[in-house]
Amino acid sequence: MKQTTYRVMTVIIFAIVVSAALLISACTQQPPQEFRVEDLGFRPNILWITCEDITPSLGCYGDSVADTPNLDQLAREGVRYTNAFSVAGVCAPSRHALITGMYPTSTGGHHMRTISNLVEDIPDYGVVLPPEVRCFSELLRAAGYYCTNNQKTDYQFHAPVTAWDECDFDAHWRKRPPGKPFFSIFNFITTHESRIWTQRWEPLLIDEAKVPIPPYFPEHPTIRRDVARKYSNIAEMDRQVSIILEQLKVDGLLDSTIIFFYSDHGGMLPREKRELYETGLRVPLLIRFPGKAMAGKVSDELVSFVDFAPTVLSLAGVDIPDYMQGKAFLGPHKANEPRTYIYGGRDRMDTEYDMVRAVRDKQFKYLRNYFPDLPYVQEIEYRKQMPIMQVLYEYDEKGFFEGVEKLWWRKTKPLEELYDLSKDPWELNNLADDPEYNEKLEEMRTALKTWQETYGDKGFVPEKEMLKEMWEGNTQPVTCTVEFKLEGNLLTITCDTEGSSIAWRFKEEGDPDQWYLYKNPVELSQPVVIEALANRIGYEDSGISYFEYK
């Protein structure tokens, strides 16, 4: 009997010791070690997989309506960012920020859009940037990276040939020279707003009856179908992402590549796209590191699109230019302090002018409406093709809206809006007039003013006047023709235009679209014809000049 009791006591004591050890282990368990690119021993490849027009509507973000197994796995193997934001609710200003590391409101890239402009009395124009500004991919090329973009640009200026080794539907890291690290972008348009109507009658992958309808939409079969189409397109996009990831695995590059996945701005539906609400600015951001470093980590750090360019340069070991307005959030040049706020802007959309600015911290969103006499809903002809939009117009005309459904259809806007996102994620309860939030309101006003004073805000300048500042004499400036100078067998190529970049190639040799970025004199060893051109962002390219070496 005593022996049995002893055995029981021994088991109990052992269980207590094991439990205590497990508890101590759990309490002292360290978070995944911070990824240090310096520890790799090589320059990593960097891959951007991007899609269009989605909020974080993925399983890994808790929205399981669409089946997204590939992106969910990417999240498990990497870091999931919960506070990543575009600078605008549309693509062109957002992509302008991504490629430059600068706020479009500070550069003149804030209108949607400048290339293919729809305003009758304003010509198409590329934003003329300060002479020191480059597409960050050009800085990577100069540092020895092979850079490809498949295929969208939409930067508010024509993409210079110096920006990419390849920029077309066939662009791929697989064409790079042996031993070169790569930076590659693959952009999927499957989730673009237009696919709501162009794929309207395609089979749905999602049960219409099970899709969640945002509270600002009425219950209607057409609305339910469009929401189901949105989720169906997200599921299809996830499948396309898997193809790129599989190619990376097949090439044996998975653990030498840093993978980013994100959307070019928020959602595709009305009151999402073009707006500065969470549904217009907040994007998914997943980053997987070699060896699955920091796998499963979730970061609530505030990240803006202006931070992407400096972050990639930091990860690639390239110095970040002083003109960039973003903060690196990874790599050896990571900013000492994380962001306190992110900022966004809304200006002309196609033919319709407005001006709204947004400031957000981790809990509150502030909006300043500079034209409160204008309605929220603008007459965007492109968007009217969406079946859901046609239903909403009918509801507005017939007075069918109820409750919060009416908010977006008001004919005027309040001067200011303030939302507590922790309690009001749909941004339906404006707190700007609530005395309890006066201190927070003043804080956000000050943050907006400081941002505008720090970087400038060209939203206050009429577009015609802004263009006159960029184009002296209302004519697009032209990059000067390149000049050649041969010393021995070294060919130097120069251009007198301040801030210009030079591209060159061997005439009639290899890929006719392949241009090399000129960095150093070209060594010549046999008879050949060199052709070269110069460009500056926003300027018209110089013509092609030729040099014959005999």
Image (tube, rainbow, N blue to C red):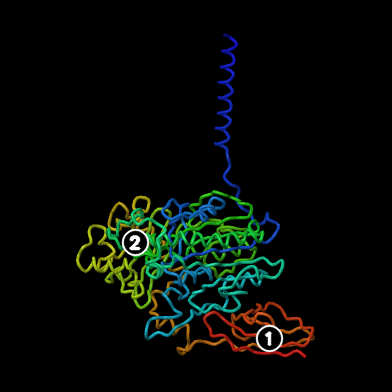
The secondary element bearing badge 2 is classed as helix
Q: Earlier in the sequence, mark 1 or mark 2?
A: 2
In the image, 531 versus 521, the foreground residue is: 531
Residue picked out by circle 2? 225
Residue picked out by circle 1? 508
Q: Nearer the viewer, mark 1 or mark 2?
A: 2
Q: Is residue 415 left or right of residue 453?
A: left
Q: Residue furthest left?
A: 398
Q: Is residue 299 left or right of residue 439?
A: right
| Kind of residue indicated by mark 1 | Glu
| Residue 298 pos. (x, y %) | 51, 50
Question: Which numbered tag is attached to residue 327?
Answer: none
| Residue drawn at (57%, 49%) of the image | 295
**Quadrant where the C terminus lies?**
bottom right
Is residue 347 at least partly visible in the picture? yes
| Residue 212 pos. (x, y %) | 35, 54
Task: Name the quadrant containing residue 21.
Answer: top right
Q: Residues within 10 Å of mark 1 (few under 14, many from 20)?
A: few
Q: Residue furthest top?
A: 1
**Quadrant where the N terminus lies?**
top right
Q: Is residue 61 left or right of residue 520?
A: left
Q: Is residue 354 above or below residue 469?
A: above
In the image, 395 versus 414, the foreground residue is: 395
| Residue 368 pos. (x, y %) | 34, 65
The secondary element bearing badge 1 is classed as loop
Q: Residues within 10 Å of mark 2 (few under 14, many from 20)?
A: many
| Kind of residue indicated by mark 2 | Arg
